[in-house]
Amino acid sequence: MPGTPRTLFLQDLPVQCWRNGGGTTREIARCPSDVNAPLVWRLSLADIKQTGAFSSFPGVRRTLVLLDGGGLTLQIADEGDVLLRVRGDACTFDGHAAVTAHLHAGPCRVLNLMTAHGSVWTDTAHVSGRHIVAEFSNGHTTERYFINEPHIMIDRILPAFALRQGKSPLLISMPHVGTELPDAYARRMTQYAAPLDDTDWHLEKLYAFATELDASLIVATHSRYIIDLNRPPDNSNLYPGRDTTALCPLDTFDKLALYQPGQEPNDTEIAQRVEQYWRPYHDALATELQRLHSLHGYARLWDAHSIRSTIPRLFEGRLPDLNFGTADGASCRPELADRIMALTRQAQEYNAVLNGRFKGGYITRRYGNPDHGIDAIQLELSQMTYMEERPPYAYDEDKAGALQHHLRDMVRAFMA
């Protein structure tokens, strides 16, 4: 079930008058939203009232799309003239170029797309029925704007995961870092869902050294409250006899209800979530492991997690700092696990355990296959080792920096 598109109304957008008096602009969206930050992309609607020169925007690519009016000619220095006659006609040019708009028969309304040179974002615009569709995408997130004045419908499309492919034999999986909670789900949920308390916060930042190791990285985008990617698709309990949350959780780790009464997902919806979020993540993970195995003759899978240090529902007392799991030796060769545990003993400020409360979830158990050259290990970090465990769950640079030094060594030893 995708997120519900939201609608803007033209009359609700603030009007900005041009300095030369030749028109007005209504900004629809920009990235980032902070007007003081360097522009990545911007979408706006302009009413051109008279013939005149455009302002210069160095460092950006511009696309103008005619929405309404008697047409215009864009006179672009060193490129010539471009005619926009009917709705949907478009022209792309460098924002630094000297451009003059010549109106044919009165005022015109245009859509204006701007994207910074060198950005990973791309933009496109096309006609679709009654709408002009403007799209911005970075290969991970896509934002589409359906323009049919006076309505502007916004649809944000976010894949289930992001994958960075490296050249080393290591793949790092982060199935619980996602924070996206689409409106279609959020409006059925309780106040306890919004803080996303059970998220594995800041792991991408903590594992930033993965880039220098040239490791592959697969990262979930959506909250585990929608579906838990580290659970079996049949919702079986990996820790029989223990209280755990479900494949599509109904409550938080603190046993607070996630859904309003009668709004819980049924079997049909759970199956849909498996197809939309769970299966794409696991298909990509399996494919990437196979690619690394083909390149090197072996592959390593590090499943990265973190959790609050005290959760009575899941474990007694305070959790050890570093909790490694190899499914009691089934997912990883003992010599690799021993190598990592030897490094934990050198990190005397932390305590560590192997195959304690967390022995490895579905990902570790499903993909670890030492006999076929794929070793998998899970690390469940106590969040108190690198961040604050209360909202707003701030990253602690000092704690994290101390932990990263040891964590990098452990990951590097696992790769070898």
Image (cartoon, rainbow, N blue to C red):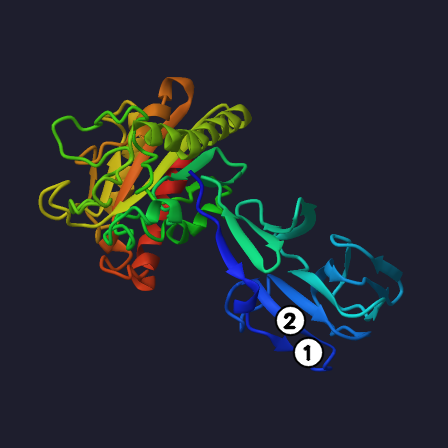
Mark 1, Cα crowd under 10 Å, few <14 / some 14-19 / many 20+, is some
**Residue at 28% across / 33% down in the picture?**
247
Q: Nearer the viewer, residue 393 or 227?
A: 227
Note whether 239 is above or below 182 in the view shown.
above
Q: How many marks?
A: 2
Relative to residue 317, is residue 91 drawn left or right?
Answer: right
Which of the two discs, 2 and 1, labels the residue nearer the N terminus?
Answer: 1
Q: Residue furthest left?
A: 316
Residue position for label 1 = 18
Q: Position of residue 301 (x, y in %)?
A: 39, 32
Q: Position of residue 287 (x, y in %)?
A: 49, 27
Residue position for label 2 = 25
Q: Nearer the viewer, residue 287 or 141?
A: 141
Mark 2, Cα crowd under 10 Å, few <14 / some 14-19 / many 20+, is many
Q: Position of residue 164 (x, y in %)?
A: 51, 41
Marks 2 and 1 in Cβ contact (< 8 Å):
yes
